[in-house]
Image: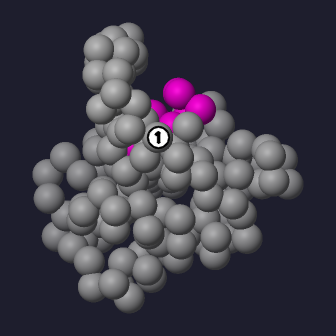
Amino acid sequence: MADLTLNIARKILDAAFAKAGELKLKPLVVTILDTRGVLKLAASQEGTSLMRAEIAHGKAYGPLAMGMGSRALFQRAQEQAFFIDAVNTIAKGALVPVPGGVLIMDGTMLLGAVGVSGDTSDNDEACAVAGIQAAGLKANAG
């Protein structure tokens, strides 16, 4: 597989929301970006709070921009706060370096990233990973 198709993105989205229902999470926003950082698909459940779409986008965008899942970005932000702050300044504030942003891999080939926001960062990440795995792909959360 060379591209992140709309059908694959829908599978990821549906499975991420299914996982959220299984875990009884707060309402989520799921954003899926292709390798260029272009929006492939995004959806929000009823009742999401303000700014969740922007946060989900930032959680997906950061891993693409930096080549690592947002859990690794979070760790790096703790260890090198000035660096991540500088990168985020260059990116015009588009990175959200907390768990919940996961790279979508087909073997070693990068297809895009998923960002999830609405519950705890760990739960957001679990939904992103579940969605990616349900589509038969590999999740790299960092």
Please give the residue where the numbered disc 1 appears in the rendered image: 72
Which quadrant of the structure image shows residue 20? bottom left
Secondary structure found at label 1: helix
Residue 90: tell me if it is visible: yes
Residue 57: tell me if it is visible: no
Left or right: residue 19 compared with residue 65: left
Front position in the image: 60 or 120: 120
x, y percentage for residue 6?
65, 58
Front position in the image: 84 or 137: 84
x, y percentage for residue 137?
71, 63
Left or right: residue 17 compared with residue 3: left
Considering the whole magenta stretch, tell me its main secondary structure: helix
* Residue 98 sits above or below residue 93 on the image: below
Q: Is residue 75 magenta?
A: no
The residue at the point 30 percent across, 57 percent down is 121
For the residue marked with disc 1, what is the amino acid? Ala
Q: Which residues are magenta?
A: 59-67
* Residue 90 sits above or below residue 9 on the image: above
x, y percentage for residue 36?
62, 31
Q: How many marks?
A: 1
x, y percentage for residue 59?
39, 43
